[in-house]
Amino acid sequence: VTTAPERGTVEPLRFEDGALLVLDQRALPAEERWIRCATVEQVADCIRTLAVRGAPAIGLAAAYALALADDREAAAELLRSTRPTAVNLAWALDQCRDAPDVLETARRLHREQHEADRRLAELGAELFGERSRALTHCNAGALATGGYGTACGVLRAAWARGRLAEVWVDETRPLLQGARLTAWELRQAGIPHRVVADSAAGSLMAQGLVDRIVVGADRIAANGDVANKVGTYPLAVLADRHGVPFYVAAPVSTIDPAAPDGAAIPIEERDPGEVVAGGNAFNPAFDVTPAELVTGIVTEAGVLKPPYAESIAKAVAA
Amino acid sequence: VTTAPERGTVEPLRFEDGALLVLDQRALPAEERWIRCATVEQVADCIRTLAVRGAPAIGLAAAYALALADDREAAAELLRSTRPTAVNLAWALDQCRDAPDVLETARRLHREQHEADRRLAELGAELFGERSRALTHCNAGALATGGYGTACGVLRAAWARGRLAEVWVDETRPLLQGARLTAWELRQAGIPHRVVADSAAGSLMAQGLVDRIVVGADRIAANGDVANKVGTYPLAVLADRHGVPFYVAAPVSTIDPAAPDGAAIPIEERDPGEVVAGGNAFNPAFDVTPAELVTGIVTEAGVLKPPYAESIAKAVAA
């Protein structure tokens, strides 16, 4: 644990003096604590225990970790095993494993993530009407990407254009990434928001209090099915019933062309103790939203629209 | 605070030695603490702060409280103002206000609640197929009714008949009535169960892991719209999508013939601090499930079926 780097834009990862500094997201917002990782094992631990989380951010953390490895092959295997659902992890490892200069490649991926986030945020903001009330789930912000944020990036860009009135933040049980992390990021960005219990989103929609839903993604199948934090699927079903546009914001690296549909995406089951003391619980970390419920997928390569098999294939090939 | 009465069936209310003993449901399951109420104000406090909760149970608590009152009219007004959504509160006060012997009337309502719960539990159990997996939300158990439980009563009766395999217990944020109270009651009854985050119910249904949903109710409108703990409506929408039967279990006293539909039911908004420290939250305690999503309403007067305007009118008139 070291002292915090300078404040400003939220930045969950920094590579300095031969080590990866990880902002411990388990301690936020109460405390800004940094973990100094000098070994691959330490980074793997940070990913497994959610000190760093969010599909793009764990990809970047793994990329930086390879720069700490003596044996890249073994390191990649270890890192790949930490969390099964986010495809960005495997994608980033594939980018770095044979790179002549791993650290330089990791830094490039990090820069590119920033640029992709900014681009998709601007594209997503164009989908907002005047003064919309948006709802988001979990945290798909700068903390989750190492950049500007995906779903939260869209919200920030919409706010900058005067198109956002307020954000409903699903608290996101069991680990409260919404109440802890998204609310913290929105507060720093000066965006009006209120936290709600995940189960309150239905009554908000029934009362006409939600104009847009924007969420991130951990893996998108070739047909447009989306794996994201558990609770996303119920939101999509409710949005469909109430005619609320439901957008997924994610970089192209979140797309897994090898997964034909959602059934091919492994869903991580986490410790039941995260839900209830004693652990008499079932704790799937993600769910799958079928493509038919997704209004659009906002990527840096454009807003993908149905039929997704075509628009996704085109985005991946570009 | 006094020592606990003898254990056995869960009993949230006892009138003894001129005072109402309230089992403090805020402290469960960690501690079985009893609050001795010798005044109407103390009972009103217990209702307002959820030491006693559940629509039928707060009705009974209010009835017993009238037995402590010097001025019944003023006491009824105070008690009626504690919580707006559950109609059983007003109903029980109406039963007792002009009774020659209030305490005897309260004790009779308590006995009748037991009998109604048992009857509706048996009727509800008949709706279960062989070895069903059921899901419930919040707590509609003995703690919530002062009897055998409504939704949990149905589960207990189904279990006794060998028709229940397991219960999924929605943890029920923000106050965790499912994780704390329903899990505690099911454990005492020896019924296998696992707690899930409220937002996980969608993926359970999508995977075919839920055969029945049974919930309680705080108020049922004349057209069959049901107000119940926030999060009930999303379950009903998901159940509809997945063809899962969705049952509401409640005594006839939960029906409000004066409310033509759900829009006429006042929805309590509770302290945002229940959701998140600092209180930057929105905290509706209930939501409304439209009648069209309700497969049946299990009452002591029979299982009511659509069209509800007719079946409800008949049950109320009987």
Image (spheres, coloured by chain):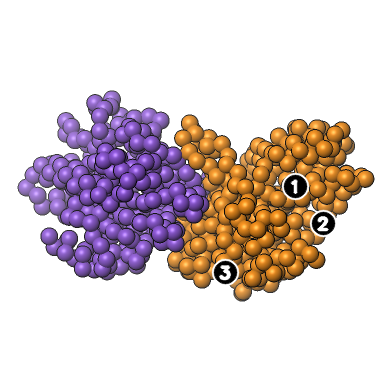
Chain colours: A orange, B purple
Q: Which residue is mark 2?
A: A112
- Looking at the image, is mark 3 or mark 2 earlier in the sequence? 2
Picture residue at 84% right of the left edge, 44% below the top: A97
Q: Which chain contains the residue that carries disc 2?
A: A
Picture residue at 70% right of the left edge, 69% below the top: A311
Q: Residues within 10 Å of mark 1 (few under 14, many from 20)?
A: many
Q: Residues within 10 Å of mark 2 (few under 14, many from 20)?
A: few
Picture residue at 79% right of the left edge, 56% below the top: A114
The amino acid type of the residue labelled 3 equals Pro
Q: Which residue is mark 1?
A: A90
**Helix, strand, or loop for circle 3?**
loop
Residue under disc 1 on the same chain as residue under disc 3: yes
Q: Which chain contains the residue that carries disc 1?
A: A
Q: Which chain contains the residue that carries disc 3?
A: A
Q: Position of residue A173 (x, y in %)?
A: 53, 46
**Helix, strand, or loop for circle 1?**
helix
Q: Position of residue A155 (x, y in %)?
A: 66, 62
Give the distance between the C-alpha atoms of the residues marked 2 and 1, in whole angstroms.
Answer: 17 Å
- Looking at the image, is mark 2 or mark 1 earlier in the sequence? 1
The amino acid type of the residue labelled 2 equals Glu
Give the distance between the C-alpha atoms of the residues marked 3 and 2, in whole angstroms.
Answer: 28 Å
